Amino acid sequence: LGALSGLAQGHDLDIAHIRPHGALYDAFFTNPKTLMPLAKVLLTINPWFILVGPACDGLQAIQQETGLLNNNAGPPGLQ
């Protein structure tokens, strides 16, 4: 993901959002803690990435714990 982001920036483009698919997407409902490492890596690559997922408690928990933005909420404190 870091290499893809670098490639995009080399062409004056930015990756704005990340949407996990398959089992990672299902993890929003079944075990959101499994997504915490992903969220932390996304923050190290680009703290402005938006994590796209279903409207659920798991997505909110990720934002509360890591500060990573998501498609269902604005920046912490502005909700």
Image (cartoon, rainbow, N blue to C red):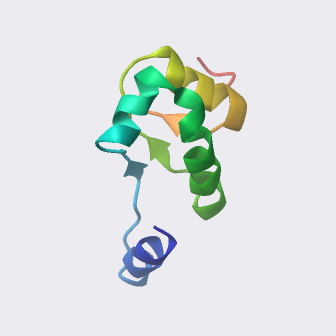
* Residue occupying the point 69% across, 37% down: 66
Q: Is residue 68 above or below residue 75?
A: below
Q: Residue furthest left?
A: 22
Residue 29 in picture, x, y percent from top left: 42, 21
* Residue 33 in the image, given as x and y percentages of width and height: 60, 31
| Percent coordinates x, y for residue 43 in the rendering | 63, 52
Q: Nearer the viewer, residue 79 or 69?
A: 69
Q: Nearer the viewer, residue 3 or 72?
A: 3
For the residue pair 25 and 67, the one nearer the viewer reads as 25
User: What residue is drawn where x is 37% and y is 45%?
Assistant: 20
Against 17, is 70 above or below?
A: above
In this rendering, would 76 be left or right of 54? right
* Residue at (54, 39) in percent of width and height: 35
Q: Residue at x 58, y 17 (%)?
A: 79
Q: Quadrant of the N terminus?
A: bottom left
Let me know if residue 77 appears in the view.
yes
Q: For this view, does 46 lie left or right of residue 70? A: right
Looking at the image, residue 52 sits to the left or right of residue 38; the answer is left
